[in-house]
Amino acid sequence: MKWALNTYQTCQDWELKRILDVAEATGYHGVELLMDYKQKHGFEWDTPKDAWDGLKSQVDASGVVISSLTSCQNFHSENASDRVETVRRVTRVIDMAEFMECDHVRVLGDRYSDENRDAVVGYVTEGLKALGNYAGEKDITVSIEMHGSFTDPDSAMEVIEGVHLPNVGFVFNSQFIGCDAGSIEPLFSRVAPHITSVHTHKVEASETFELYRQMFEWLNRIGFSGYISNECAYTGPDPEKVLALYVGLFKAFVQ
């Protein structure tokens, strides 16, 4: 397992160099750059190609890698032209990932109602299959985050089984659906083989601490070698200390 720093909230107002420097100093192997929110790191689906070299040179000069380009594009629109545009945008993100020597791109599903559930699952499956085929030629994994309506493992598994590509999987968003009895077995026995990376939140919270412990144990047991991404959303006065403490906690879970 490797540790990544996600730029959600804690780093959302930081320039790229500070993100890279802090991640390296606090023990992370990679950074996961959140897109579509105009964060200051400079990575967006429409970042001009003539800016890519300058961004890559900063990453190459650091001691960390880009673990994922984390697109917030989604496929739930009932307008077919919107979904075509989503594929176009994420295809460009995949091209950027290839240029940056990053092997993982995240997308969202994202939300449906009882009335349009089956249609949206179909839209997501179709879009992910197109992206997975494109990314596969570049040895890049595309993952749908188990987020929004797709925290539901039934819907998420329906998409993964419908896409049926080796380079398409899940970002597990640490929403422990169906684990009310205190065990992750009902959930992880289904989704764990498809997990490519994990987003963690307030790991230290008492109500989910034991489930996180089981998750790390499970992933360690199956030889998971992807990134555990810290999305703790800390916005207090001492981010370096807090980010380092999370790395210490992650390590303790797998020792």
Image (spheres, grey):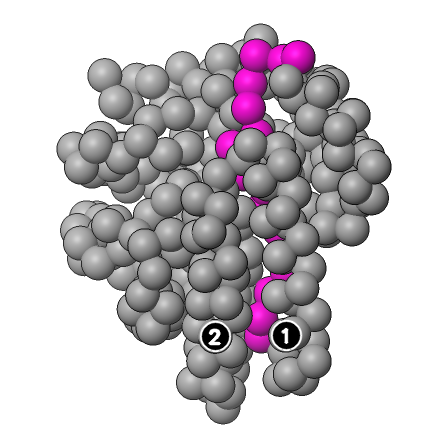
Q: Earlier in the sequence, mark 2 or mark 1?
A: 1
Residue 64 in magenta?
yes
Q: Main secondary structure of the magenta part?
A: loop
| Label 1 Cα neighbours within 10 Å, binned few <14 / some 14-19 / many ≥20 | many
Q: Position of residue 77 (x, y in %)?
A: 63, 78
> Distance between the Cα atoms at labels 2 and 1?
10 Å
**Residue 190 visible in image:** yes
From the viewer's perspective, tell me whether residue 53 is left or right of residue 159.
right
Q: Name the residue under label 2.
A: 126
Residue 158's place in the image compared with 212, above or below, is below
Residue 238's place in the image compared with 104, above or below, is above
Q: What stretch is highlighted in magenta?
A: 61-76
Residue furthest out toward the bottom: 115
From the viewer's perspective, tell me whether residue 191 is left or right of residue 78.
left
Q: What residue type is labelled 2?
A: Glu
From the viewer's perspective, tell me whether residue 55 is left or right of residue 137.
right
| Residue plotted at (63% across, 47% down) | 95
Residue 134 in magenta?
no
Say which quadrant the N terminus sits in.
Answer: top left
Residue 86's place in the image compared with 13, above or below, is below
Q: What residue type is labelled 1?
A: Arg
Residue furthest out toward the top: 25
Q: In which quarter of the image is residue 87?
A: bottom right
| Residue plotted at (44% across, 52% down) | 136
Q: Name the residue under label 1.
A: 83
